[in-house]
Amino acid sequence: MLSTENENNPNRGGSLPKVRAAVDPLPEDSREFEIDEEFLDDLRELIQIRSTASIINILSDLHSPDIADIIDNLDSEDRLFIFELLDDETASEVLLELDEKVREDLLERLSHLRIRDIVDELDSDDAADIVGGLSDEVAERVLDDIDKEDSQTLKELLRYPTDSAGGIMATEFVSVNKNDTIQKAIQRVRKMLKEIGEIYNVYVLDEVGILVGFIPVRDLIVHNPRRRVYKVMESEFHSVDVLTDQEEVANIMKKYDLITVPVVNTKGEMLGKITFDDIMDVIHEEAEEDIQKFAGIAGTELVSHGVWDISRRRMPWLAIAFLGQMISAVILSSFHESLEKIIASAFFIPIIMAMAGNAGIQSSAVVIRGLGTGEIWEGMLVKRMIKESGVAITNGLVFAMSIFLVGWLWIDDALFGLVLGFSLLTVIASATVVGATIPFILTRLKIDPAVATGPFITTSNDALGLLIYFAALSLLYL
C-alpha cells in the first residue's frame, strides 16, 4: 500500500463515525446478500432523513462488493452520501468494485484530500488506475500531496498503456540479493508482509537488479537459514516484458498455471509483479469486451450508460446488418420468378438463412477463441480449413438428408427435396469455411478478429445462403 502522512487531514477525526465493512466471514445465513427494490426504498428513506446511525449499522455487516452493488443502484446524491460514511480503507475497496461510470461520478465530486486518503490505502496498480481516471488538475494535486516516493511510483506506472503488463502490475514485491542468506529472505518476508499482504514468491536479483530466480515462500522454511539464496533458488522461471499486452499475460499465466508472474524491462530488471487476482479482472474485461464485439457493440457498454451512449455503440453494427439484409432483399428480388413458380421455396428461406448464420458463427467463434488464447495461430489456416471442411460436410450431410426427407414427404416432390438438401449442404459448408477464414484474414491485417463476428458474418452468410439456394432452384426448375 502507498504511504503518506495524514495527521493534518481535516477529514480525519471528525464526529461522524465511519463504516468499516465486514472483513471476517459472515454467518452462514447472511453470506449471500441480494439487493431488491424494497431494500433500496428503505435505504433511500433513511438517507432522506439522514439516519446515519441506522445506515452505518446496515453497511457495517456487509462486504465491500455488496456495498458497491448498493451504491451502483442509487442516484448521484444518495451514493455520495453513502460513500462519505465509509472509512478510507473500506472506501478504497468499494471504489474498485463500482461500475466505471459510477466511480467516475464519485471521483468528480470528492475532494482531492479524500481521494488522496483513499489512494493511500491502495496497492500501486489499483492506485494508478484511480489516479489515471482523474482530471489532470485533480490528479496533479493528489500526486503532490502523497509521499514523494509513492508519487514517483504512480507517475511511472501511469506512463504505461492501461492494457499492458506495466498498466496492471503492482510495484510491491519481496526481493533479495542472490548472495543473501535464507535467514535474510525470511526477515524480508516478515517485514513486507503487512505492506503487501499475500506473498507467494521471493524474487532473487543480482547486484544490478536483474531478475535471476525466485524462491516460493513455502520453501523458505525447509532450507538451512545459513544457506545462500542462489544455491536453492529456482533459476528457470517465466516473466513478461512491461509492454506485453494484458491478454497475452493472462494466456501465459493460464498456460503455465502461475499464481504470480514478474514484470521486467528490456534489460531484465524487475519492475513489478502481476498476481492471479489482477489477471481475473483482465479475463473478465477481455471476455466482456469480446462478448460485446461478438454481439456487434462498439466500445464498452455499461449498465449506467445513457440511452444515447448505448445507441451510439450499437448503431454502427446494426447499420452493417441493415446493409447486409438489403443485399439479401436484392437477391430475393432477382429470383422472384423462382418464388412465383415454386411457392413452397419461400417456406424454407428462414431455415437456409439461419443455418448459414449459425454455422458461420460457430466456426468463427472457435477460431477467434483459439487465436486469442494462442491455441491457434496464423500458420494453421490450411490445417484449420481442412478440419472445418470435414465438420461442415459431416453436419451438412446430416441436415441435408433431414431436409430432403421433409421436402419430399411434405411437398410431395422428391426433386424439390433434393434441391433443398443440396442447397443446405452447400450453405453449411461454405458458411463454415467463411466463418473460420475471416478471423485469420483480419488477424493478418492487424484487426481484432472479434469484430468480424455477429452482424458481419451473419448477414454475409445470409446473403450467400440465399444466393446458393435460389441459384440451385433456378438451375433445376427454370
Image (cartoon, rainbow, N blue to C red):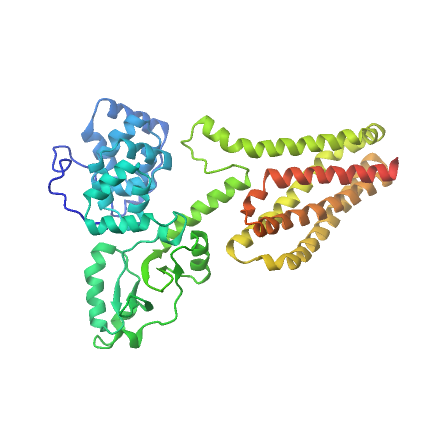
In-front residue for pair 371/21: 371
In-front residue for pair 263/233: 263
Q: Point out the image quarter for the C terminus.
A: top right
In-front residue for pair 420/111: 111
**Does residue 21 show up?**
no
Q: Residue at x 83, y 43 (%)?
A: 418
Q: Position of residue 76 (x, y in %)?
A: 31, 27
Asked whether, in this view, residue 267 is left or right of residue 140, the answer is right
Q: Position of residue 93 (x, y in %)?
A: 28, 43
In-front residue for pair 66/243: 243
Q: Residue at x 38, y 56 (%)?
A: 242
Q: Residue at x 50, y 33 (%)?
A: 313
Q: Quadrant of residue 355?
A: top right
Asked whether, in this view, residue 464 is left or right of residue 370, the answer is right
Asked whether, in this view, residue 142 is left or right of residue 247, the answer is left
Q: Position of residue 78 (x, y in %)?
A: 28, 27
Q: Quadrant of residue 230?
A: bottom left
Q: Quadrant of residue 67?
A: top left
How many labels were placed on the picture? 0
Above or below, 12 against 372 in this view is above
Q: Position of residue 84 (x, y in %)?
A: 22, 33
Above or below, 17 against 93 in this view is above
